[in-house]
Image (cartoon, grey):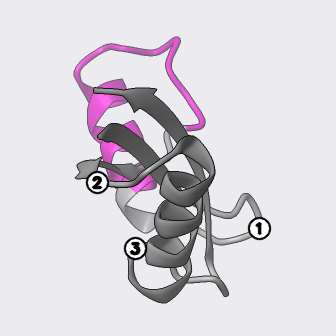
Amino acid sequence: MFKAIITVKLRPSILDPEGKAIEHALQSLDFKTLSGVRIGKLVEMQVDAADRAAAEAVVIEACRQLLANQVMEDYTYELHEA
């Protein structure tokens, strides 16, 4: 059993209106030193696989098919034995 931690973020070339809105709100709250806010998502899941290679294959396929929009988003993952 493995635990996967997947981070999905918009590619740098894609505008992030939610990040911009949060950046503006932070600056209006006097956090003037904060900038470049980008929003992403974090997904944690258990992977029941025989070995690390099989677990990685499942995680990558899940990201490709559902968790990350391949046109607009990039993803990274960590895999830990549970």
**Label 3: few (<14), some (14–19) or many (≥20) C-alpha neighbours in 10 Å:** some
The picture places residue 25, in percent across and down from the top left corner, at 27, 38
Sequence order check, earlier mark of 2 and 1 = 1
Residue found at the far right of this picture: 13
Based on the picture, tell me whether residue 65 belongs to the magenta stretch: no
Residue annotated with mark 3: 67
The picture places residue 38, in percent across and down from the top left corner, at 50, 46
Check disc 3 and report its element: helix, strand or loop.
Answer: helix
- Indicate which disc residue 48 carries: 2
Sequence order check, earlier mark of 1 and 3 = 1
At 48% from the left and 88% from the top, the residue drawn is 65
At 53% from the left and 77% from the top, the residue drawn is 61
Alpha-carbon span between mark 2 and mark 3: 18 Å
Q: Which of 5 and 42 is in front in this view?
A: 5
In this picture, is 70 found above or below 5? below
Image: magenta residue range? 19-36
Residue type of the residue flagged with mark 3: Leu
**Label 2: few (<14), some (14–19) or many (≥20) C-alpha neighbours in 10 Å:** few
At 56% from the left and 80% from the top, the residue drawn is 64
Residue type of the residue flagged with mark 2: Asp
How many discs mark residues in the rendered view?
Answer: 3
In this picture, is 53 found above or below 78? below
The picture places residue 69, in percent across and down from the top left corner, at 53, 82
The picture places residue 66, in percent across and down from the top left corner, at 39, 84
Image quarter (top left, top right, bottom left or bottom right) of the N terminus:
top left
Q: Which of 18 and 64 is in front in this view?
A: 64
Residue annotated with mark 1: 13
Q: Is residue 60 left or right of residue 21?
A: right
Image quarter (top left, top right, bottom left or bottom right) of the C terminus:
top left
